[in-house]
Image: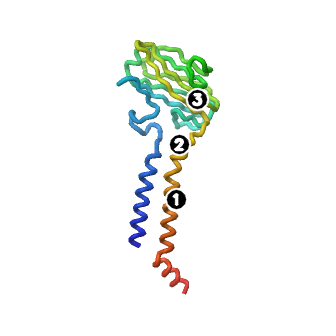
Amino acid sequence: MKQAIQAGTSILVLVATLYSGSATAHGKVSMEEDSCMRRLGDSSMVHLSAYQPQYEPADQYCTEIPKGGNTFLVVDLVDPALRDIPIGMRIVRGSNETEDETVSYVRPSYHPDGVIKGETALDKGEYTVFITGEAVPPVRYEYPLRVEMINYAKTFRAAVGPMIAALLLTLLGYKIMQSKRVRQWRSSRGS
């Protein structure tokens, strides 16, 4: 029984270690680790959030948008110096700012509050958000967007931990059922 408890504890620690890496809720990480943060040089940073309140009012997304439809894009100009230059935003279907179809455009202007807001209707597919500032040298950030597209690699990585946990728990259950004490207990109950 002591061995079963030790094995169970070891499995729980292993599962917790493996599964903790897959918890990546947007907004719960430091700025350096946030995948929605873009840095230019040492201090110039912007942050993108996408919202679809018609589906999930409280959820915010970054580059993986679960459904097509009206999408609100909010760019936070983290660096205060960016608030003093004209900054615009262009969303294109595809990845080429000049050759692909522009689906939404916010003209360059000053944003003293540090927030650029835009709304667009996005269909299933790949898009790119280009954020450009009229400065010397020019400021430019890019965000690839995937709308209604399954990221199989991410899905697989998220499923590996629970699959390993289920396999280890099945193995542990099998070992416990095969132990001498369990067999003796079953045979004593059958008599």
Helix, strand or loop at label 2? It is: helix
Q: Is residue 172 left or right of residue 68?
A: left
Q: Residue at x 53, y 31 (%)?
A: 50
Residue 26 drawn above or below residue 96: below
Residue 112: give its label: none
The answer to which of 143 and 47 lies nearer the viewer is 143
Spatial separation of the CA atoms under disc 1 and disc 3: 38 Å
- Mark toward the start of the polypeptide (2 vs 1): 2
Q: Which residue is mark 3?
A: 71
Helix, strand or loop at label 1? It is: helix
Give neighbour class at mark 2: few <14, some 14-19, many 20+ (Cα, 10 Å).
few
Q: Name the image quarter holding residue 113.
A: top left
Residue 19 locus on image (x, y percent)? 46, 50
Give neighbour class at mark 1: few <14, some 14-19, many 20+ (Cα, 10 Å).
few
Q: Residue at x 51, y 27 (%)?
A: 143
Q: Is residue 47 left or right of residue 128?
A: left
Q: Which residue is mark 1?
A: 166
- Residue type at numbered disc 3: Thr
In the picture as drawn, the residue positioned furthest to the bottom comes out as 191
Residue 52 locus on image (x, y percent)? 57, 33
Residue 31 locus on image (x, y percent)? 39, 33
Q: Which residue is mark 2?
A: 154
Its colouring scheme is rainbow
- Residue type at numbered disc 2: Lys
Q: Residue at x 44, y 30 (%)?
A: 37
The answer to which of 102 and 111 lies nearer the viewer is 102
Spatial separation of the CA atoms under disc 2 and disc 3: 23 Å
